[in-house]
Image (cartoon, grey):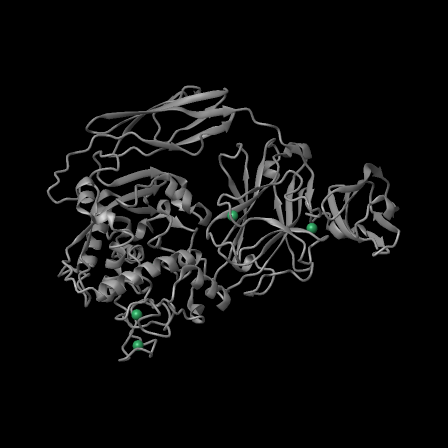
Amino acid sequence: MKLNLKQYQILLIATGFIFQFSLTSYSQHLNINGENEPCYFDNYKYQNRQLILQSEEIIQNYLKESAQSSEIKSNHVKIIPVVVHVIHNGGSENITDAQIQSQIDVLNEDFRKISGTNGDGNGVDTEVQFCLAKITPDGQCTNGIVRIQSTLTNHLTYQRSMLKNLSYWDNTRYLNMYVVKTINGASGTLGYSSFPGGPADEDGIVVRHNYFGRIGTAASSLGRTTTHEISHWFGLYHTFNNSCGSDICSDGDYVCDTPPVSSPNFNCPIINSCSNDMPDVYDQIQNYLDYTNDACKSMFTSGQKARMDATLNTFRWDIWQYSNIWATGCDSNYNSPVCNAIADFTSNSQDVCIGNSIQFTNKSLNNCTTFQWYFPGGVPSTSNAVNPIVNYNSLGTFDVTLIATNSVGSDSITFSDFITITNPSVGQPIPFAEGFETSDFPPNGIEIDNPDGGVTWELDTLATQYAGIGSAKINNLINTNYGQSDALLLPNFDLTSFGGSPYLSFRWAYAKSDPSYSDELIVLISTDCGVNFTQIFYKTGAALITGSTQTTPYIPDSNTVWKLANIDLSSYSSITNAIIKIVNVTDGGNNLYIDNINLGSNILGIENYGNNDFSIDLFPNPANSIATLQYFLPTNENVSMEIYNPIGQLVYVTSNTLESSGKHQILIDAEKLGASTFYILKMKIGDKLISKKLIMN
Ligand SMILES: [Ca+2]
Ligand SMILES: [Ca+2]
Ligand SMILES: [Ca+2]
Ligand SMILES: [Ca+2]
Ligand SMILES: [Zn+2]
C-alpha cells in the first residue's frame, strides 16, 4: 500500500514525524500472496503504517538524545525471557523441545556473535540473549513451551488475532513466539513479526515449524528466519526498506552503516544494487535483514545494534530488567525443578444455542499426558480426550473442570458458570433481496458488525450502481485500523424454507490504491448460532478488482464494472438458523461496494430476466404531475411497489399481488407522494428487487 503525497503529509502532521520518506520507493514490494516473500513484515508494515511512524519517532528521538549524551553507557548483556507457543494439529508441526532449544541456541549464536558459529560474521555482538522462561506469569514452574492443538496452525489473514487469543503471555515480561504449520495458506511466507509499539495482545513473532530451529522438521534450515523476525520485533527494517532511498542515514532502513539495497536479494549473490552510498560498496547480503539464504547471513551492524538499544530502552524496557529476569527464572542461578502439571483450557465459545457443540482447547503446561474433564450438562459429561468436543442439549449455565496429570503429579482447575446454553430462533424464510435503495441503512434486518468502532459500511449514492441509486460501501482509504474486519451481518435465515438449492449472490466493485496491497472481501457462514464460521468466498488482489488502481477514491462509473458473486449454498439447505456475514478486511486500500444481495435462486439460471431485465420503464422522468411505471413480466410473478422520499419515509405502497405474465402499468400521481423532488421507487418482482430514481418537478 503506497500513500500519495497528500496522505503522507496528513500522517506526518498527525504524528509530528519529520523524516523524509521517499514517495517512489515501494515499487519493489513483492506480492501479497507471499510468493518470494519470506517475511510478512512488509505487509504488516503497511497495514500498521501510522503506528510505525509513531514508533519510529520514538526510536529516532532516543538515538538523537543518546548521541548527544556525554554519559558513558555501561553496556551489559540484556536477557529476553521467551515463551514458545506451539500451535499444532497433531502433525509434525508439533515440534520437539529439542528443536525449540536449537532455535534458542541459533538466536544466541547470531545475536551474541559467538565465535566458531555461523553467527560469527563481520558484524557486532548485539549483547542481547534469549532464555526459555522457567516461571509462568502466575509464578508457576514451566519449561517455557506451551503446546496447543488447534486448526489455527493453518491460519489465514483474518485469523491472526484469533491465533494469538489462543495463548499469550504478558509482552512486557515475555517475548511471545508462535510456531505454526502454515501462514496464509500455501504461500511462501515463512514468518512475520510485530513492530515495537503495536497492540500488546498481538505482540510477538510467528514462524513456520519447518523454519524454526535447525534440527527435526527444520533440519534443512539454519534457523535464521527467527533471527530475522525478532530483528523486526526490536525495531529493525529490511536493508532494502524504501529501496536505495534519498539519503543513506535518514532514509532506507534508517541505519547509516548498512549499505542501501534496491530490492530483496535472494540466494547469496554478489551485487551492488545502489550507487548512492559513499563509498559505493556492494550490498551487504550477509545482513540478517535481507532475504538471502540462511547460510549467507551472519551479521548485524553497530547501527542496527543502536536501533535495538533504542527499542530496548524505550518500548521494551521492562522485559530485560533484572527483577523480571529473576521472576521468569532466567537468572543463571535459578535452579529449575521438574515442573508439576498446570491445568488450563479455553473454548471456542461460552454462549451457544441448545443442541450445538463447543470445542474445548487444552492449554495445560508441562508435558501433561493424562486428562480428566467434567462437563455437567454436557454430552459426554466426562472425557479423557485432549481437546474434547461437547454437545449441550439442556438449557442453563454450567461449570467445566479439568484435571491434568504429568510425571510429577496432577492439577485441577474449575471455571464456574463457564457455559451458557440458550434457545435458538428459527431464521426468517428466504428468498431475501436487498439493493440498498432507501435511506434506511443498514436496511432489511441487516446489521453492521464494527468491532473497532471506527470506519465501517455506509450507504453510497455517488457511484454508478449495479442497479438503482444506492449500494453499501466501506471507505478503506481512511480505514486505517489495518487487518480489522467490518461485517454486513445478514438476518438469520431458515434455508429449509427455500425447498431447493439456495444461492447467495451479490455484486461488488473495488479498485486498489496501490498495486501491491489489497483489502479483502470474505463471506462466512455459521450453522451453529455463530460459534464457528466457515469461509465460503474469498477475494483479494487481482481477483477482487473491478477498476484500475487509483490513489483517489474509487467510484464505479458504469454498472458493467460490477462483478457477480454467486455462492452455492446447497450443502446448507437443511439449516434453519444460518448466520451469514459479508466481511471487509481493510488494508487501507480503496472503496469496496456491495449491491444486489440475493438469497434464493441461482441467479445465473434466471439471468435472462434477472435484475434490470424486467423491462421496467418509468416515464416521463422528471415528471410534472403523473409518471407512468410500465413493466413486462415473462412469467406470473408476485409484484409489489414502494416509493420512499429522500429521508426514507415510505410515501406510497401497493400490496403484494400475484400478477399474470405480460405488460403492466401503474400511474403515479405526484400529489400522493408529497412535496419532495426526488423519490426512490422500489419494486419487488418475485425475489428480485429493482429500484429507480423518480424526479417530480
Ligand atoms: Ca542503510
Ligand atoms: Ca552500493
Ligand atoms: Ca443498489
Ligand atoms: Ca471498522
Ligand atoms: Zn522481514
Q: Where is residue 690 in the image (x, y as percent from the top left)?
A: 75, 48
Rendered residue at 30%/62% (across/down): 61
On the rendered structure, is 581 left or right of 410?
right
Q: Position of residue 532 (x, y in %)?
A: 49, 36
Can residue 220 be seen here? The reply is: no
Can residue 138 be seen here? The reply is: yes
Q: Position of residue 543 (x, y in %)?
A: 55, 57
Name of the residue lying farthest toward the left:
333
In which quadrant of the rendered view does residue 377 lie? top left
Q: In which quarter of the image is the C terminus?
A: bottom right
Numbered circles on residues, count: 0
Q: Nearer the viewer, residue 292 or 263?
A: 263
Measured along the vertical axis of the image, is residue 182 above or below residue 17? Answer: above
Measured along the vertical axis of the image, is residue 313 above or below residue 292? Answer: above
Q: Where is residue 661 in the image (x, y as percent from the top left)?
A: 86, 43
Rendered residue at 37%/51% (across/down): 198
Measured along the vertical axis of the image, is residue 40 above or below residue 430? Answer: below
Rendered residue at 25%/48% (across/down): 216
Q: Which of 445 and 34 is in front in this view?
A: 445
On the rendered structure, is 212 left or right of 439?
left
On the rendered structure, is 363 left or right of 575?
left
